[in-house]
Amino acid sequence: MTVMELVNPATAEVFADVEMLDAAAVDRAVTDAQRAQRSWAGSTPASRGMALRAFAAAVEAHRRELADLEVTNSGHPLGQAMWEADHVRDVLTFYSATPERLAGRQIPVSGGVDITFAEPIGVVGVITPWNFPMTIASWGFGPALAAGNAVIVKPAEWTPLTSIRLAELAVESGLPEGLLQVLPGRGDVVGEAIIGHPGIGKVVFTGSTRTGRRVMEQAAQSVKQVTLELGGKSANIVFADSDVARAAATAPYGVFDNAGQDCCARSRILVQRSIYDEFMERLEPAVAGVRVGDPRDDGTEMGPLVSRPHWEKVASYVPDGAPVAFRGSAPDGPGFWFPPTVLTPQPDDRSVREEIFGPVVTVQAFDDEAQAVAMANDSAYGLSGSIWTENLSRAMRVSRAVASGNLSVNSHSAVRYSTPFGGYKQSGIGRELGPDAPSAFTETKNVFIAVGPDPQAEGTS
Ligand code: NDP
């Protein structure tokens, strides 16, 4: 039996271990999932909706327990982890309305009646990363269960605990055994077994673009549907006609939330040259004001990085002699602490082009709107971004011109369960969340029913 030791990122101490499963476990899980899915899809829409609301209530009742697990396993600040548990509850509640609303269509045709059915795919695999373990799992399993599927989740090796607990809560709240299963294991073992399994009809993958390419290649072998949510290198564009004080005060929270381990991190700040000096003067105290510390404290805004290997990757972007404009603070001692860091590099520096996935932001100047849009779009990614301007026309023009799936004007809005989320270009394929997400977990079946003439009517005519 292989075991993964789990490390508390704030203390660098091992606090638990988890058995790592193998491909045979995936086979068994698929058999159980297929059985559970048949009974789930066969139950009434109203009872499925109620079951999802009961699951949401169980998450609500255990929100502090789930949050504490995430604080210890992932180093997330307590307030953020509570938000994450509540978000899982909200995702389940939102999609609990789906079973009674997942309607097909009636399409006008000659010679009969044509109707479509939104049928469940069957068993869906959900492979998640370590940065937001429970919320990202719920973006897959919430709408997938609501559409009548069973779900098998493969959490990231470093952070499996909240997903494991959520699957227990699903059973405790009354969902059939086997309907939502969590299989901890390595990506190249359990993850690949899920993608290759003939009994699994769709894979939702969230993670790096590099692994996403591999997932897509492997899924192609069995012509499996995929949704991919991948990396980002999003721009925060600050125009001279914006509320500069607010743009500067909020910029740290657009990139340093979750210690920058956020695919939506606005990790490239682009500032109009005429306000560059003023913006930097205002940004420095805002960065110094980010409260970095013990994730168990209520007031903490930023915790440690998730692991030692990830700390080393992030640190490689700030070598000796790096163009550091200024930095915030971070605790000394054990734990994978990294201070919020602001760089002013050359445009071709790797810190400008690559996803760092840590609390490091670059600042560059632009001259006009056209250059701002060109710089924002000069990336292989297109996931998120923010636009700061008081000019409504400019806000609309730039929103339409930036090739990105999720933009905020005069804010760094977080992901909402009720609106679609996903990326352009190499940030992914498909959309999660929002009103249409359950459709991504269905097959459309078209049925034509021939309607002949009334024989009695024929006889009398
Ligand atoms: P990885 O791509 O390394 O891993 C993601 C998941 O895939 C993990 O569960 C991993 O397992 C698994 N995996 C690894 N190799 C394979 C394989 N060959 N087949 C199947 N599964 C595999 O990403 P990280 O966990 O490092 O997450 C960080 C990345 O995720 C960042 O690039 C970030 O931008 C992106 N991300 C994107 C989001 C979005 O919505 N667009 C949201 C959050 C993160 P294991 O743990 O064993 O390696």
Image (cartoon, helix red, strand yellow):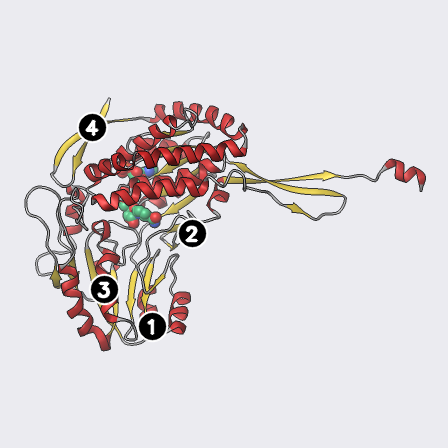
Eye-nearest disc, 2 or 4? 2
Label 1 vs 2, first from the N-terminus: 1
For the residues labelled 3 and 4, the Cα–Cα distance comes to 42 Å
Q: Is residue 459 left or right of residue 423?
A: right
For the residues labelled 3 and 2, the Cα–Cα distance comes to 32 Å
Label 1 vs 3, first from the N-terminus: 3
- Count the marks: 4
For the residues labelled 2 and 4, the Cα–Cα distance comes to 36 Å
Where in the image, quadrant-wise, is ligand 1 located?
top left
For the residues labelled 1 and 3, the Cα–Cα distance comes to 30 Å
**Disc 1 to disc 2: CB gap under 8 Å:** no
Disc 3 marks a residue whose amino acid type is: Asp
Disc 2 marks a residue whose amino acid type is: Pro
Tell me the quarter of the image containing the C terminus: top right
Residue marked by disc 3? 348
For the residues labelled 1 and 2, the Cα–Cα distance comes to 25 Å
Eye-nearest disc, 3 or 4? 4
Residue 232: name its quadrant: bottom left
Q: Position of residue 135 (x, y in %)?
A: 33, 42
Residue marked by disc 4? 17
Q: Residue at x 18, y 29 (%)?
A: 16
Q: Residue at x 62, y 45 (%)?
A: 105
Q: Position of residue 255 (x, y in %)?
A: 24, 56
Label 2 secondary element: loop
Furthest-right residue in this view: 460
| Ligand 1 contact, mark 1 (Cβ < 8 Å) | no
